[in-house]
């Protein structure tokens, strides 16, 4: 099979997954958007957390042209993306107690929304993050693949998964192992699709939340691209108006 054929197959599988999520997750997307809209309308803040490559989708929501200005990254030191050593983030995901300490020392408070992203939803860090956030009065939106709860076991001492500690669960429908392609002449499955699907899923939530806010007569605190005329001035105004809800700017 040619390289181009494999590229086309990946696009086809990604499109299939996106269509599946669009059709199957419409109701959870609507409920997640309502939680975000409720929070923003009430003067609250939104936080997003993801470890390893799940952090990419979390960061995609923060300080984003066309996105809500009040979405903040909730970073876990050593587990933000794939900073060197990349293996450290994987190890920290399995440490009990770390998420509680991080959340307790963050600006998140009761009534805020926390988006927890974990493809497997089985490791201690995302499970504990969601559970402790709920106990602390935050509203939790979990983004995960429910296939893992069937095909794997939990690594948290409670035996639970991320899905068990969320107000709303968004299933990205990505298969166990993340990869969507195989080939007879390639010894391992390849072509991970989770970043494409999760990012699209969360941007759909933000789009729906913006629409919900507008329907209530509340102007969504949206950012514009700084590379279009007037964008910088627009953003300065929005950030100033929401200064008490923005933690990525010092």
Image: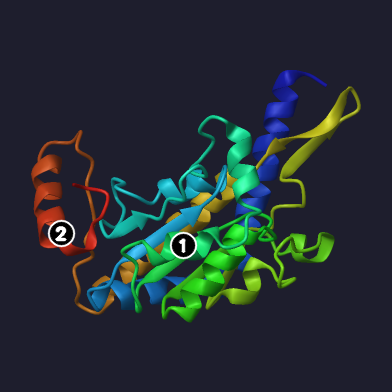
Check disc 1 and report the residue beneath it. 101
Judged from this view, the residue extending furthest toward the top is 2
**Residue 225, horizontal then vertical, whole percent:** 23, 41
**Residue 241, horizontal then vertical, whole percent:** 11, 61
**Which residue is painted at 9% across and 53% down in the image?**
237
> Where 75 sits versus 144, above or below?
above
Which dot, 2 or 1, sits closer to the camera?
1
> Where 24 sits versus 16, above or below?
below
Query: Regarding mark 2 in the picture, which secondary structure is present there?
Result: helix
Crowd rating for badge 1 (residues with CA inside 10 Å; few <14, some 14–19, many 20+): few
Mark 2 and mark 1: Cα distance apart in space:
25 Å
Apparent side of residue 79 relative to residue 246 in the rendered image (left or right): right
**Residue 229, horizontal then vertical, whole percent:** 12, 36
Tell me if label 2 and label 1 are in contact, CB under 8 Å. Answer: no
**Residue 203, horizontal then vertical, whole percent:** 43, 55
Check disc 2 and report the residue beneath it. 243
Residue closer to the observer: 113 or 36 = 113
**Which residue is painted at 35% across and 65% down in the image?**
46
Which of the 4 image quadrants contains residue 146? bottom right
Crowd rating for badge 2 (residues with CA inside 10 Å; few <14, some 14–19, many 20+): some
Task: Give me the disc on residue 198.
Answer: none
> Where 105 sits versus 134, above or below?
above
Q: From the image, which quarter does the N terminus lie in?
A: top right
Query: Regarding mark 1 in the picture, which secondary structure is present there?
Result: helix
Name the N-terminal-most of marks 2 and 1: 1
The answer to whether residue 232 is seen in the rendering is yes
Residue closer to the observer: 204 or 123 = 123
């Amino acid at each position: 099979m040619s390289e181009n054929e494999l590229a086309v197959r990946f696009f086809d599988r990604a499109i299939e997954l996106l269509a599946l999520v669009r059709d199957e997750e419409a109701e959870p997307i609507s409920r997640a958007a309502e939680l975000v809209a409720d929070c923003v309308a009430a003067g609250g803040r939104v936080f997003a957390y993801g470890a390893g490559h799940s952090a990419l989708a979390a960061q995609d929501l923060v300080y984003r042209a066309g996105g809500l200005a009040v979405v903040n990254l909730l970073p876990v030191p050593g587990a933000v993306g794939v900073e060197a050593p990349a293996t450290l983030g994987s190890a920290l995901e399995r440490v009990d107690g770390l998420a509680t300490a991080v959340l307790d020392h963050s600006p998140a408070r009761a009534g805020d929304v926390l988006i927890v992203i974990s493809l497997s939803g089985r490791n201690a860090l995302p499970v504990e993050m969601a559970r402790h956030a709920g106990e602390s009065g935050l509203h939790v939106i979990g983004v995960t693949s429910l296939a893992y709860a069937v095909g794997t076991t939990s690594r948290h001492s409670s035996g639970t998964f991320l899905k068990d500690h969320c107000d709303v669960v968004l299933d990205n429908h990505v298969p166990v192992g993340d990869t969507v392609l195989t080939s007879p002449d390639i010894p391992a499955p390849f072509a991970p699709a989770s970043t494409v699907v999760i990012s699209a899923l969360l941007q759909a939530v933000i789009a729906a939340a913006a629409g919900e806010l507008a329907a209530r007569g509340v102007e969504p605190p949206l950012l514009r691209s700084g590379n279009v005329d007037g964008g910088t001035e627009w953003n300065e105004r929005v950030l100033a108006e929401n200064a008490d809800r923005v933690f990525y700017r010092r």
